[in-house]
Image (spheres, rainbow, N blue to C red):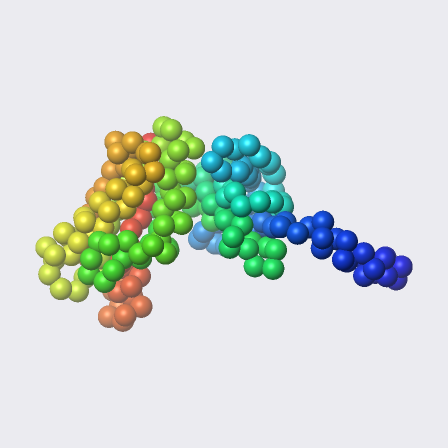
Amino acid sequence: MKFFLVLSLSVGIITARSQGEIWIEGKVVDVGTGKGIKANIRYKSLPTGGITGSFRDSVYRFSIFGSSKYEVSAEVDGYITAVAIVDPKKGTEGKILRNLMLTPKGQTIRLTHLIFEQGKSIIDPASFDELDEVAQMLIDHPKLVIQLEGHTDNQGSISKNMELSQERVDAVKDYIVDKKVSKSRVKTKAFGGTKPLSNDKTPEARNLNRRVEIRILSE
């Protein structure tokens, strides 16, 4: 009871001292099962890495000050390293929640937030944060070579779909290379509508089939 009384009397002081403080927290989970995975979690301020920290757990939580973005990564045997970039400007009520999704090695990573203009290869600016994370992953691992694999739905012309999927992965490659990643480390391959995830004739299924995935070729 006394603890809560002291806390309520001190709240003004605490708020003043914590002004500008943002808490970053999240879980490390298997992308397929959603189960938590204990991993080596590291964070650093960008671009210089002047502030760093690490955990060995399936959850993480740390506080930051100022306007610098931070990179958070999770590594564990048998999985592709997960990288997230957090921006304190996007904090809500002094907090940013960001889970790190780990993909088993041998599987492809789907870019779930990648958006193009309909029927075109123009990347929506809302996609830039996710692509920045891909670029940062390549910067952190200089031996990593990836392949961007483009897919469309299976509606319309087969040749047009193949052309569009190639143009889209080329656009993604150009964005990543522009972040000072060697173009020789980013391969591309177009599949058009030949590898659908769903054969349902619904708008949801067609949206699911339109995607770009990352395959790790060497690391």
Relative side of 35 to 17, left or right: left
Residue that appears at 32% across and 44% down: 214
Quadrant where the image shows the C terminus: top left
Residue toward you, 45 or 169: 45
The residue positioned farthest toward the bottom in the image shown:
202
Q: From the top left corner, tell me how far across and down residue 160 is, in percent.
A: 12, 56
Residue toward you, 119 or 70: 70
Residue that appears at 26% across and 65% down: 206
Residue that appears at 55% across and 55% down: 91
Tag count in the figure?
0
Q: Quadrant of residue 9?
A: bottom right
The residue positioned farthest toward the top in the image shown:
143
Q: Quadrant of residue 196?
A: bottom left
Is residue 19 shown to the viewer in this render? yes
Q: From the top left corner, tell me how far across and down residue 29 is, in percent.
A: 51, 50
As drawn, 199 above or below 39: below
Residue that appears at 39% across and 49% down: 130
Residue toward you, 135 or 149: 135
As drawn, 40 above or below 58: above
Relative side of 44 to 153, left or right: right
Q: From the top left corner, tell me how far across and down residue 89 is, in percent.
A: 52, 52
Q: From the top left corner, tell me how far across and down residue 1 is, in percent.
A: 88, 62
Is residue 29 shown to the viewer in this render? no
